[in-house]
Amino acid sequence: MGMIREEDATEDPAALDRLPCQCGVAPAATGDALPGAHDLNNNPWTVALLDNSDAYFCSGTIINTLYILTAANCVSGRGTAFQIRANEQVLGTGTPRAITRTPTSVVTNGDLALVRLSTAISLTAYDAVKPACLPNSNKDFVGEDARHSGYDHGKNMKNDGTWTSESGNRLTFDPNSDSHPYCREDLGGPIVTEQGGKNFLAGIAIDTSCSTSAQPSAKVSNYHQWIMDNSNTGRFCER
């Protein structure tokens, strides 16, 4: 896929009928103080991918009522034989109220995959089920703070860092020295950057090395048009 070169816009580029909710906002955030720093309420756009035996293998991001964005490597060769789990802090506990969906289709482009859910997921009913905001086309996040969240070890965890560089359709995530790299089942999870009080999906975790210094991640803004073209049957929150 070629890089999209458009001037950054401040307005929402998607003229779609939107739901009465806000993307990129965690309405019940517990803050960064331990023990609640890793709470799903701080990262409510995060979901887990499980096989049909309930073994977790990757993470993903809610973008609207019907679509999850994840890494292409997570779903390669799986078809639609897996599950999406939302609203569950520790997998297998059912809390706060586990929501499971199955995919009806998967489309991939470069490092990314869009998964369509069999049944829409409510973006207004649960504090821990909210979408991340999609950035405008070709939005640059280099030099900004970033936060990854995912289900390594079977529970939602966050990893803080910074975007240090970009190359082609990838950004480099540098984990903070007092944090951890994303790893294993964190693959496919969201890496968000907060701007104007909203969390934008700057990257998707694709690094399999668990590097503590430089983790290549998919640059979501370079896929903006493809994402919108292939996910607009779902309903988006306001941005």
Image (cartoon, rainbow, N blue to C red):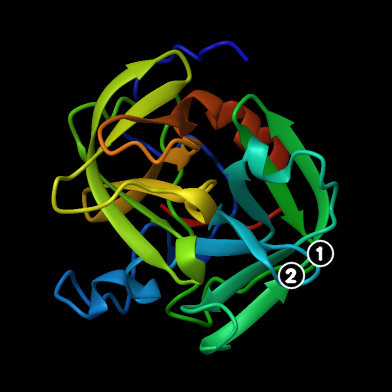
What x and y, as percent, mark residue 63? 55, 53
51, 32: nearer the viewer: 51
Residue nearest the viewer, comparing 31 with 180: 180
Residue plotted at (47% across, 66% down): 153
Badge 1: residue crowd in 10 Å (few <14, some 14–19, many ≥20) = few
Mark 2–mark 1 Cα distance, whole angstroms, equals: 6 Å
From the top left corner, tell me how far across and down residue 37 is, in percent: 24, 71
Compare residues 201 and 100 and report the one nearer the observer: 100
> Where residue 206 appears, x then y in whole percent?
51, 36
Which numbered circle lies on residue 151? none
Quarter occupied by residue 50? bottom right
What amino acid type is highlighted by mark number 1?
Answer: Ser
Residue marked by disc 1: 118
Q: Give the labeled residue for mark 2.
A: 101
Residue under the point 32% across and 46% down: 181
Amino acid found under the numbered disc labelled 2: Arg
Which corner quadrant of the image does residue 57 belong to?
Answer: bottom right
Kindly report which numbered mark, 2 or 1, lies closer to the viewer in this rendering.
Answer: 2
Where in the figure is residue 64, as x and y percent of width and height?
Answer: 59, 57
Vertically, is 1 above or below 177? above
**Element class at badge 1:** loop
Label 2 sits on a secondary structure element that is strand
10 Å neighbourhood of mark 2: few (<14), some, or many (≥20)? some
Q: Quadrant of residue 140?
A: top left
Residue 154 falls left or right of residue 118: left
Lateral position of residue 157 relative to residue 152, left or right? left
Whether pointer 2 and pointer 1 mark residues with C-beta atoms closer than 8 Å, the reply is yes
Residue drawn at point x = 22 percent, y = 56 percent: 197
